Image (cartoon, rainbow, N blue to C red):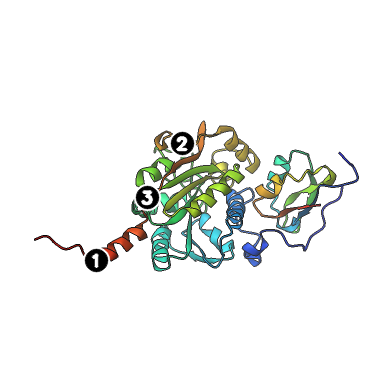
Amino acid sequence: MSPVEPTEIEFPLDELVRRDRLPHLWCQGCGLGILLGAFLRAVQAAQIDMDKLALVSGIGCSGRLPGYVNCDTFHVTHGRAIPFATGLKLANPELKVVVVGGDGDLFAIGLSHFMHAARRNVEMLVVCVNNLNYGMTGGQLGPTTPLDAVTQTTPWGNPEMPFNLVELAAMSGAVYVARWTVSYVQHLSAALQRGMARQGFAFVEVVSPCPTMYGRLNWEGDAVEMLAALERVSRISHGVPPAEATFDPERRILCGEFVDVERPSFAARLRHLGEAAFHPEPCLL
Amino acid sequence: MDGERRLARIHVRRDECKGCRFCLDICPKQVYEMTDRYNVRGYRVPEVCDEAACVACRRCETICPELAIYIEPA
């Protein structure tokens, strides 16, 4: 038995990452690292031009993801990645815009932005890394923290019912909605690829363990045990009505694709409006 | 299987590993094991103990959160 020698050979994803920034700052066993790999493989598989890819993120551990990717990245204020991304995409429609954010950034402080961008069908892929808490700041409750869970701000158990993000995204008008856990790595990569190809508001929820904060506060074991627990409760259930896409980390998490439709994007509607303004129909008065 | 020929060469960036053990846990062939050695960053890290057993399924490469594994087809 011998340890593998340190190697200088090039790894397949090396040209897609900012090598001088690795290893990343995320914790041992954090699902964000798995998501980074899955996302980069999706970009490779879709042959996306790195010069046309723009990642936008807010605050939190998820917000650090774009900083490791070798494309134009935009790290903005808490909850506001989607409005920045909207401006970016409308000003430069050739860009492929992807927003990465956590459950708090996207669905607490950023909730209104999320819902309106989905309602308008602004073309972008939004990836929510749902680790059930505000991890970076020490493990406070957020809008997806399960009922009765312990967090820094709910030491006697969470009294609030959490959101079902798939249901929320679908209800807001997203044209592609999927949920995967970080243990479904290949499915996740495929969903990210499909989301990036969609000409509309696409949403992928990525359920991830947070071993250092949420997991520790709720006695969920180490990273390997948390990932195994996620696998135990997860089932693939494509096409289930979004309101029935159960998200109960103790009991059942339904994964798969839940919405997959087409409708005109916000930009397409603006263009149509612009044409109408320059060539108005004659008014019959 | 043929003991002379390997299906893959396993490359691990040992010093970027944080010892989460997903690779060890997910490998179907027990290629990895924990030793009592540490890497330069102070993590106890899984090590390849049986490269010949690797069937190049690449589950370890895909799941590694540090992107520290590359399974090079032989």
Q: Chain of mark 1?
A: A
Q: Does residue B49 appear anywhere in the picture? A: no
Q: Which of marks 2 and 1 precedes in the sequence? A: 2
In the displayed structure, A224 sits above or below A40; it is above
Q: Are marks 2 and 3 on the same chain?
A: yes
Residue type indicated by callout 3: Arg
Label 1 neighbourhood size at 10 Å, few (<14), some (14-19), many (20+)? few
Q: For mark 1, give the secondary structure.
A: helix
Label 1: which residue?
A277
Label 2 neighbourhood size at 10 Å, few (<14), some (14-19), many (20+)? some
Asked if the residue under mark 3 is in contact with the one under mark 1, i.e. CB atoms within 8 Å, the reply is no
Between A191 and A81, the one nearer to me in the picture: A191
Task: Point out the residue furthest to the left here.
Answer: A285
Residue type indicated by callout 2: Gly
Label 3: which residue?
A263
Left or right, residue A59 beside residue A181: left
What whole-number distance in Å separates the C-alpha atoms at marks 1 and 2? 40 Å
Numbered circle sitting on residue A239:
2
Q: For mark 2, give the secondary structure.
A: loop
Label 3 neighbourhood size at 10 Å, few (<14), some (14-19), many (20+)? few
